[in-house]
Structure formats: C-alpha cells, structure tokens
Image: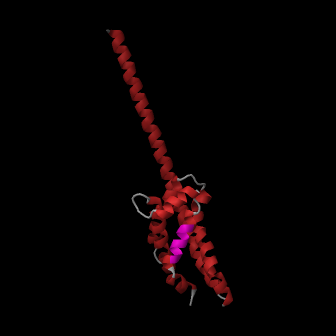
Amino acid sequence: MTLLEAIAGREEELAQKWASLILGTYPEQTQAVWRNNRDQFSNPVGHAILTSTAELIPLLLTWNNATAVAKSLETLVKIRAVQDFSPGKALSFVFLLKKLLRQEFVKELAARGALEELLSFETRVDNLATIAFDLYVAARDQVSRMRVEEVKRAHTNIVRRANMLKSDVAAHKAE
C-alpha cells in the first residue's frame, strides 16, 4: 500500500488528529472549550479548524486544484492572522501536518524502504505552507487597511465635532 493510499484510508482520522494538534497551539482553557463544542455557531473557530483540516487532506492527496486548496486554507489562515500569534506561530499549523505524517507513517515506510514517498508528500505540505503564507500576508494587509480606514473615520468625526463646537461658540458670541 502506498503512502497516498494509506492516507486516503485514514483521511477522517488524520484530519481529526491534525485539528487536535492545531488546537494544541492555543491556551489550555481555549482548547478545552473548542474541543468539546463542535457547534459552528457557538464555536466558529473550532468548527473552522475541523472543517479546514477535513477538506485539506483529500485536496492534498489529489493535489490538482490550487484554488480549492487556497479556499479551504483561507478561513483558517484568516482566523490565525487576527489572533495574537507571531507570523511563524500563526502558520505553524501547516507544518504540524508533517509532524503528524511522520508520527503515523515513518516506521512503516522505513521498514519497506519507501521514505521517498513521505518526502514527496511533504513537498505538497511545503507548497501548502507557501500558499498559507501568501494568504496570511493578504489577510494582515487587509487588517492594516481596515485599521487605517477606522482611524481616518475617527479623525473625520473628531474634526466634524470640533467644527460644530466652533460654529456653536461663534453663534453664541454673535448673539
């Protein structure tokens, strides 16, 4: 059985384990809440992690639709882009998949002299990291632009109020 066949046979299990590793990057109290609540409305982040990992495993197996890969990755990357993570920590979840694959398959592959299959698949994970980086940069750029626009709006409102006060003072002096 090839590595791709082994992964395909365990897609759901591997997606759950990868999601668990990703949840492990959060504080313990957060992990407890997100692990136990699978409702997408009361736990959107936990649900997004589970959904993204479940979508990405089969996409990595076929590796023929970069748009679908980016779409599945985007939600998770956007969430981590606005959280209090350094860029490296925010994107480390991609490399947790490599860790998982090594834990699950390296002994079996080494025993039959097929470690090159793992290395080949890890190249897909590396490419996934590149896509995640591009998405992360775009998300952080969007957040920065939104902050600048908010400052501009706040400044405009302050100037408007100051002008209204100034005109009120001038009207009272004229009376």
Asked whether residue 70 is in view, the answer is yes
Left or right of residue 54: residue 3: right
Q: Residue at x 44, y 71 (%)?
A: 68
Q: Residue at x 51, y 73 (%)?
A: 15
- The main secondary structure of the magenta stretch is helix
Left or right of residue 88: residue 41: left
Name above or below for residue 85 compared with residue 54: above
Q: Residue at x 57, y 71 (%)?
A: 127
In the image, residue 125 lies at what x, y percent? 57, 73
In the image, residue 174 lies at what x, y percent? 33, 10
> Quadrant location of the C terminus?
top left
In the image, residue 100 lies at what x, y percent? 60, 74
Query: Outermost residue, left direction?
Result: 175
Instruction: Place residue 166 in its image quadrant.
Output: top left
Q: Nearer the viewer, residue 118 or 23?
A: 23
> Quadrant location of the N terminus?
bottom right
Asked whether residue 136 is in view, the answer is no
User: Within the magenta stretch, is there residue 167?
Assistant: no
Left or right of residue 63: residue 104: right
Q: Which residues are magenta?
A: 13-20
User: Within the magenta stretch, is there residue 15?
Assistant: yes
In the image, residue 93 lies at what x, y percent? 57, 65
